Amino acid sequence: MQRYIPFLKALRKLLITLVLVVLIILSIRVTEPDLVKLVSSFPKAESIMGQLLRPVFFDRESEKVTVSQVVPVPCDSVPVPTSADSGSRIVLDPPCGSPKDVINLRGFDLPQNAEISLRWILPDGGLLSIKNIKTDDDGEINMPLEIRPITSAIDGKAAQISFEVTLPNGKLVVAKTLKDVINAMFVTIFMALIATTIGTIIAIPLSFLAASNITRKGKLGTVVYYLVRAFLNIIRSYEPLVLATIFAMIVGFGSPFAGVIALSVTTAASLGKMFSEAVESIDTGPIEAITATGANRVQVVMYAVVPQIIPDFLSFTIYHWDINVRISTIIGFVGGGGIGYLLSQRINTLQYSQAGTALLAIILVVWALDFLSSEIRKSLV
Amino acid sequence: MLKVENLTKVYPGGTVALKDLSFEVSDGEFLVIIGLSGSGKSTLLRCINRLIDPTEGKVILDGIDVTASKGAELRHIRRKIGMIFQHFNLVKRSTVLTNVLNGRLGYLNPWTTTLGIFPGEEKKRAMDALKRLGIDDKVDSRADALSGGQQQRVGIARTLMQEPTLILADEPVASLDPVLAHSIMQYLERLNKEDKVTIVCSLHYLDLIQRYATRVIGLKDGIKVFEGLPSEINREKFKEIYGEEAQDVRATALE
Ligand SMILES: Nc1ncnc2c1ncn2[C@@H]1O[C@H](COP(=O)(O)OP(=O)(O)OP(=O)(O)O)[C@@H](O)[C@H]1O
Ligand SMILES: [Mg+2]
């Protein structure tokens, strides 16, 4: 038998290797990697990334200006109007015409490289699109225009050519998207804050019940200890995202409330566990010493236990707030409200630049909180 | 007067730490308990103030049965019994002042102290205790910022707040160097002589025993194997208490 042991060991290694290889092959097959697609969709990705990386912060304040020009058809139907010689304007050459004539239309002092929708305003008030045209680098347009019979003047009222342009007046204003993002970010931060607070308040008593050095005494204590531990472990095994989805189905999608409930529950469970470990690791010397002075139980807890656990409790709580902000950004995706919800909406409506603003805000806030929380925790030790 | 009658302690694991131990301590004595590690010294001291419940036997302090009391009565008895520990047992993150005030908790209103409020006169009492031990300049330091000797003095100041009639000291100098050991023992001696506090103290060093003890009890495996004056501890007795290997230690300690 002895002689076979090395052989058996080698066989076992071989088997384990085989199983691993099979598992890896299986996992590649189920995840359906498509490298061709990754390359072929590069142009699309480039455009999306380009927009994501150009987040919107400011808009130029603008005015909408309607530029129009009366067109007498035929020429003697109404007096030929004089055209303005400054500002955004349309100049026709000749300034009037008969149906089927082709005249020259020029526009001056328009926004550069802007899309403009030219249209007729017919004498009866109806609208007729002409074409979309882009202004050139000088903010001008120049195109032939065919005069249609339908544009003939009726009862001394002539048709007009008109379009609307938004003229930037130079002032920078905070983009609406940025305001929305900041609002949603605050919702997320406060969502995390309130969930952490509720979770902490629940976690404190639970942690003492789940601490072996406090609770696991006598039959009743042992039963309570194991029950609370099991409860905490079961709750902890639920992902906050799953819980948030469930609560969102109950209280409605897009509501921060769903996220708050889900986060509170998971925070209570994981802080309960972390706190209980802090309670278990306290030095029993001071407890012994203060008990020996004739202090009662409450005094012993206040003066021997609390000073030992406060820094740990605070540090864990701040750390968890930090984690909760991260989770709540994602919770929005499953209907929990806040910045994640805004981000998912912008992505679904293909507004990638706005989505970029939200992404940048998330990165900045997560980074700032990470820094802040680690600084605070350092000062607590 | 402290009376220990037929004290036995069996730990849940089955270890017999004390076996049918009886002795008396008169007021004003400085009794030293000696014995090897594991001989039951700590268990004995903790049975006296009921940090540990003895399995059998009685502890009677000034006519009151400590072993039978519980709740508020037990806390009132504990108030008058100070305790000093090898590892000082201070709340490390609290200030020296708070640590000293902790010694007074048994006397104060549980509600106001729970809120962290201590009367002004108690703070003054704490300052006086610290002055007496020569560390009043450390009053606002965190306990863990102090050296071992300073921490033990804070421990004694905390005990002073109890206005004790009896002090239990469990190897109070075992984690200190010899010079500091003497200075701490001298504080205990002054409490014993000036304040007439009875002292029951476990010790390891023979020179300290000869210098401070008025009487000595030797324990071995939870059984009393010696009781007498420090001068009565001769070669034979020491071998009996500490075993053969202790010879050399004794030789150097007696010089
Ligand atoms: N909580 C406990 N549970 C079980 N056994 C214990 C416990 N505390 C002490 N013992 C045992 O009881 C015996 C006496 O221990 P004790 O601590 O009283 O000895 P000691 O004389 O103070 O020793 P040392 O000089 O090392 O402090 C030892 O055998 C020890 O292992
Ligand atoms: Mg001991």
Image (cartoon, coloured by chain):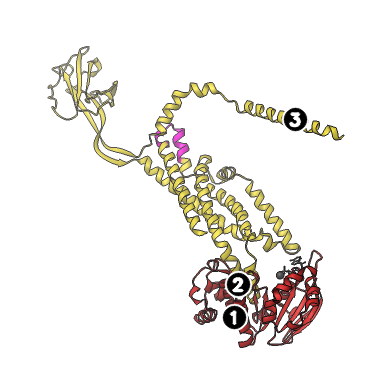
Chain colours: A yellow, B red
**Residue receiving disc 2:** A299
Whether residue B252 is visible here, answered yes or no, is: yes
Q: Which of A300 and A256 is in front in this view?
A: A300
Residues packed near mark 2 inside 10 Å, few (<14), some (14 to 19) or many (20 plus): many
Mark 3 CB in 8 Å range of ligand 1?
A: no
Question: Which chain does the residue under circle 3 lie in?
Answer: A
Q: Is mark 2 on a helix, strand or loop?
A: helix
Highlighted magenta segment, given as a residue range: A342-355
How far across and down, in percent of the image, does residue B178 sit? 62, 72
Q: Is mark 3 on a helix, strand or loop?
A: helix
Q: Does B166 lie within the magenta span?
A: no
Residue A346 lies, with reference to residue A84, above or below; the image says below
Task: Name which quarter of the figure residue A65 lies in.
Answer: top left
Task: Give the overall secondary structure of the magenta segment.
Answer: helix
The kind of residue on which mark 3 rests is Leu
Q: In 3D space, how far apart are the residues under numbered discs 3 and 1 (Cα atoms)?
A: 71 Å
Q: Does A348 lie within the magenta span?
A: yes
Residue at 60% in and 66% down: A305
Residue at 51% in and 42% down: A330
Taking the image in four quarters, ligand 2 sits in the one at bottom right
Q: Quadrant of the C terminus of chain B?
A: bottom right
**Residue receiving disc 3:** A15
Whether residue B5 is visible here, answered yes or no, is: no
